[in-house]
Image (cartoon, rainbow, N blue to C red):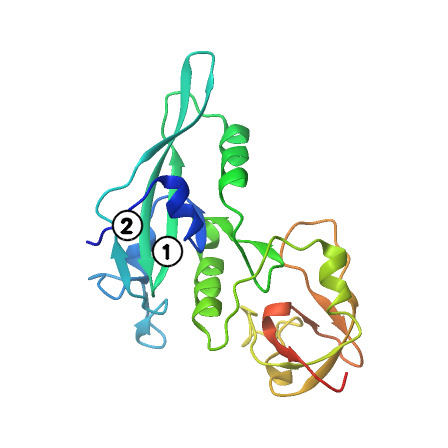
Amino acid sequence: MIHFHGTAEERLAQTLFIVEGKACPLWCQHSKDSLFPPWNMRENKRAYPASNWDQVASNPIITVGHIGKRPINISTEWYRIDGQWVMFYEGCSELVDRAMIEKWLDEHFTGTWDKGTRRAAMDEDNFSWCLQAIDEANAPGYVKPGPLLTAAQVDKGFVGKRFTVVKCHGKDHVRGDPGCVCRLIGKKVTIRKRYETPFAGTASYHLKGHKQRVQRSEVGLPDVKA
């Protein structure tokens, strides 16, 4: 175990990502020290890439507010995962007010990722986003993004520009997922417009001359000639 000194607010100022949920099942899946990680039988390897997890020895219970005289508390766990601080939290008081918890977190944690386009917070079911943010933060030339950008601000610096596709986050490559951009990796593409959808999720963009859509995190830096 390691130490992470400071108040909860001081720790959050140094934290890359916050995750709602328990750390233990995620440690079992992703830590290199896990003795029984999920296994991909077809390929005879771990189902998830292994990460270095360092657990913080002492973690506070935070009172985020009160309803009458009854406190609204969250329990916290901090880990250093591949060199980046991550906080896990859960409501732990007899009375839990999710709106009050979210309001307190919004006031004390302003972290973003994916070049400032997404808030660095998610539940444990989408923990892969936290790992993507860690990879982004550990990449050469990383610059910590500022406050969360609006959709209009994101599109202004993205739509109409040319980028090189560098990775694919598609899950069904073998099945021929129409959103998979594996075949475009290494190629330059021009962003046409944002994909309009009523559902929440990662923004994707139509490409000129291609049927696939691309996410910001799947492309590199813009072409200087664009």
Q: Position of residue 160 (x, y in %)?
A: 80, 74
| Circle 2 crowding by C-alpha within 10 Å: few under 14, some 14–19, many from 20 | some
Three-letter amino acid code of the residue under disc 1: Trp
For residue 4, the mark is 2
In the rendered image, residue 7, in percent from the top left (x then y), is placed at 34, 40
Measuring 34% from the left and 54% from the top, which residue is drawn there?
Answer: 26
**Which mark is on residue 150?**
none
Is the residue marked by circle 1 packed among few (<14), some (14-19), or many (20+) residues within 10 Å? many
Q: Is residue 83 above or below residue 188?
A: above
* Residue 126 picture location, percent across and down: 48, 54
Q: Secondary structure at mark 1?
A: strand
Q: Residue 85: which numbered mark, if any?
A: 1
Q: Mark 1 to mark 2: distance in Å?
A: 9 Å
Residue shown at 59% from the left, 64% from the top? 115
**Residue type (three-letter) at the residue carrying disc 2:** Phe
Q: Is residue 102 left or right of residue 183?
A: left
The quadrant of the picture occupied by the C terminus is bottom right
Which dot, 1 or 2, sits closer to the camera? Answer: 2
Residue 91's quadrant in the figure?
Answer: top left
- Is 93 drawn above or below residue 27 in the view shown? above
Circle 1/circle 2 CB separation < 8 Å: yes
Determine the image quadrant of residue 179: bottom right
